[in-house]
Image (spheres, grey):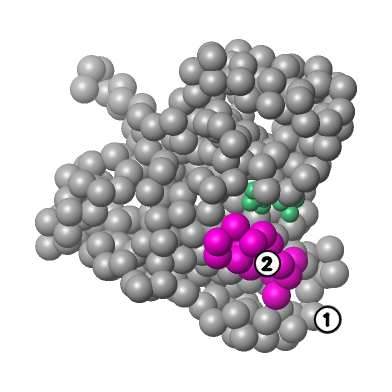
């Protein structure tokens, strides 16, 4: 270290780095190495700073554990059948009026319960220029598509230039009325919500941003600032969460989460039932318990705080409210 200037903290990607940072006990290094051979790991500094222990609500979401290597009989590598509904690389078209566009499969953080965990990773899935052109052509050729949802991976880790170009091309399609981006960046790396990124997000057509967050502690002052800057552009912010055992499966944790979202200008949109991706059984919450918790919260918290509790049915049958 030179003259007391500390290096900028980096995203932790290797189990040994998690141990060195005090986020993983040395006794769990071997199991984490086994997980790392199969699934991507990334813990950015903003989230690392929030983890008190590997089994607290933040550690459980991001620190690898041996349970990930056990696939239960009902679990599937593609639980909601994205693949079967993909007419060409990067596009998923399940609902007539909406298409997903996945410009990349990398994320700022890899969640241990991710439903796309078999697909995502740091060097995966960046669409080539030709594949992007084919995706635009598909969208242009389907006049029923009113909304394009950019997801991935996390579209907000694209360079602002690249992201801006994609948004410009999509909004130039006459029948595309709405743009939407699904992201964890405001929570995982709030500093990435930079002036250049904000400039890229200035669209003519309405843009919605859905922010994935599962615990009130993730909505730090820095995350709130990032959200405020997005909201200032006139971008409505929606909240997406997954109901996760040990993370947010109590009335108190859900009330704290939804209230923290509202304070950050995020309207809770969906509370997802866990998708059965491989090695995620430890996060399972019975839907009957999920319904009971939301019922118990009625009257306790603002009506604006309630998301729709949703199940994405296996086999590509689509979402239904629970
Ligand atoms: C979830 C999802 C959407 C978006 O659904 P909304 O209910 O509009 O949020 C679109 N396409 C696919 C394939 C999806 O899985």
Q: Which labelled disc corresponds to residue 31?
A: none
Residue 142 figure quarter: top right
The reply to whether the residue tagged 2 has its Cβ within 8 angstroms of ligand 1 is yes
Relative side of 180 to 131, left or right = right
Say if mark 2 contacts mark 1, CB within 8 Å: no
> What's the magenta bit mostly, secondary-structure-wise?
strand
Is 131 situated above or below 290? Answer: above
Residue at 17% across / 51% down in the picture? Answer: 33
Q: Nearer the viewer, mark 2 or mark 1?
A: 2
The first of marks 2 and 1 along the sequence is 1
The residue drawn where x is 68% and y is 81% is 291
Residue under pointer 2: 310
> Would you name the residue on which mark 1 appears?
299
Span shown in magenta: 308-322
**Residue 293 placed where, x, y %?**
66, 82
Where does residue 16 sit, x and y in percent of width and height? 17, 45
Q: Secondary structure at mark 2?
A: strand
Would you identify the image quadrant in which residue 268 lies? bottom right
In this image, 107 relative to 21: left or right? right
Q: Quadrant of residue 237?
A: top right
């Amino acid at each position: 270290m030179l003259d007391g200037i500390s290096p900028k903290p980096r995203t932790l990607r290797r189990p040994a780095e998690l141990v060195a940072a005090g986020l993983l006990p040395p006794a769990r290094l071997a199991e984490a190495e086994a997980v790392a051979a199969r699934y991507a790991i990334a813990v950015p500094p903003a989230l690392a700073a929030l983890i008190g222990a590997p089994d607290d609500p933040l550690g459980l979401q991001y620190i690898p554990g041996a349970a990930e290597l056990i696939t239960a009989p009902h679990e599937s590598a593609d639980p909601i059948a994205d693949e079967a509904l993909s007419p060409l690389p990067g596009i998923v078209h399940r609902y007539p009026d909406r298409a997903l566009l996945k410009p990349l499969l990398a994320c700022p953080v890899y969640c241990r319960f991710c439903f796309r965990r078999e697909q995502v990773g740091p060097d995966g899935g960046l669409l080539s220029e030709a594949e992007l052109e084919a995706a635009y052509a598909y969208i242009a050729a389907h006049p029923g598509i009113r909304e394009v949802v950019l997801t991935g991976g996390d579209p907000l880790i694209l360079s602002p230039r690249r992201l801006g170009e994609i948004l410009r091309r999509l909004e130039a399609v006459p029948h595309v009325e709405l743009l939407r981006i699904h992201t964890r960046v405001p929570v995982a790396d709030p500093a990435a919500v930079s002036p250049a990124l904000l400039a890229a997000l200035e669209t003519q057509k309405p843009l919605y941003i859905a922010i994935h967050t599962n615990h009130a502690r993730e909505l730090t002052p820095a995350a709130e600032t990032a959200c405020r800057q997005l909201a200032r552009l006139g971008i409505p912010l929606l909240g997406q969460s997954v109901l996760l055992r040990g993370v947010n499966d109590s009335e108190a944790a859900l009330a704290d989460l939804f209230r923290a979202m509202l304070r950050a200008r995020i309207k809770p949109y969906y509370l997802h039932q866990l998708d059965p991706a491989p090695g995620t059984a430890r996060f399972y919450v019975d839907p009957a318990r999920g319904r009971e918790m939301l019922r118990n919260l009625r009257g306790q918290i603002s009506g604006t705080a309630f998301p729709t509790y949703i199940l994405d049915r296996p086999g590509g049958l689509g979402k239904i409210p629970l």
